Amino acid sequence: MADKITLGYTHVSGCTGCTVALADNYAGLLTLLDKYVDLKYMPTLADARHIQKVDVSFVEGSVCINDKLAVEEIKETREKSTIVVALGGCACYGNITRFCRGGQQNQPAQEAFLPINELIKVDVFIPGCAPTPQMIRNVAVMAYLLLKGTKEQKDLATAFLKPLMALPVQGTACGASTACFCDLMTNVIDQGLCMGCGACAAACPVNAITHEYGKPQGERDLCIKCGACYNQCPRSWFSFDVVENYEAINEAIMAALQ
């Protein structure tokens, strides 16, 4: 039996799509829970309802600052976690919750929502609406290797997680805590890196991106600033640390899931 890491899952204001993406790992999720992860609390999968001291906390959703309990809960998550992971566009960038007005029929009663890094220090972002199941799984495996692995495994985990750990502290085209098509334009298209693969358009949950003459075109009025397009783009994640260790990283993940 491996020396497990402890995991918590805090769910604030979100649609539960990230939870579904996590569950879509199927057998891979069962392997993680059996061998590597001791799930301490999670609203949908564990009996415990109160935040506990853990090695890693996944946070889904943004924080409604009109809700005192939600603000206290996210602060308690930070205090009791060694590593905090913002899971999905709402937790990372606010996503569609930034457009809530409140006090109207068929809309949320509250009106002010913030991504979690505007309230607490966040160590890792996993953007997307929702992130892919494989990405969630890979981050979970690498988090385990970073905390419990050999020196070689820790080096591989550091290489893999480095770009995700940079996202909470680096600025974007629209500001420190937002992400949109502007990031693709500034960091990929304007740099001559776009290869017209269509991954950004396929990832956009509101169909705000179309392709014309082989290049993506963004509709600013439709964008919900979830960061899915930029973080799905294969050219936005270019990192020599990852590229030079790609095979070793992939082998480490696959070996852990056997």
Image (tube, rainbow, N blue to C red):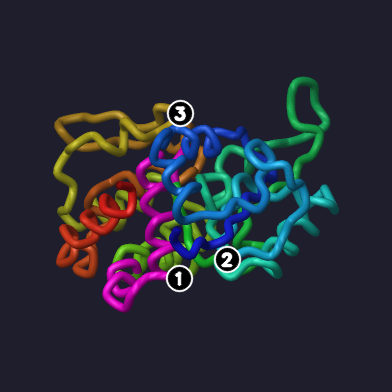
Residue 190 appears in the rendering: no
Taking depth in this image into account, of 72 and 153 the one nearest to the observer is: 153
User: Is residue 133 highlighted in magenta?
Assistant: yes
Residue 258 appears in the rendering: yes
251 left or right of 139 in image: left
Residue 133, above or below 51: above
Q: Amino acid at mark 1?
A: Leu
**Residue found 60% across the figure and 62% down from its top:** 117
Q: Which residue is mark 1?
A: 147
Q: Which residues are magenta?
A: 128-157
Q: Amino acid at mark 2?
A: Asp
Comes first in the chain, label 1 or label 2:
2
- Look at discs 1 and 3 and give the one toward the viewer: 1
**Residue found 43% across the figure and 66% down from its top:** 165
Comes first in the chain, label 2 or label 3:
2
Within-10-Å neighbours for mark 1: few <14, some 14–19, many 20+: some
Give x and y (percent) for residue 189. 23, 50
Q: Which residue is mark 2?
A: 55
Give x and y (percent) for residue 217. 29, 35
250 left or right of 85 in image: left
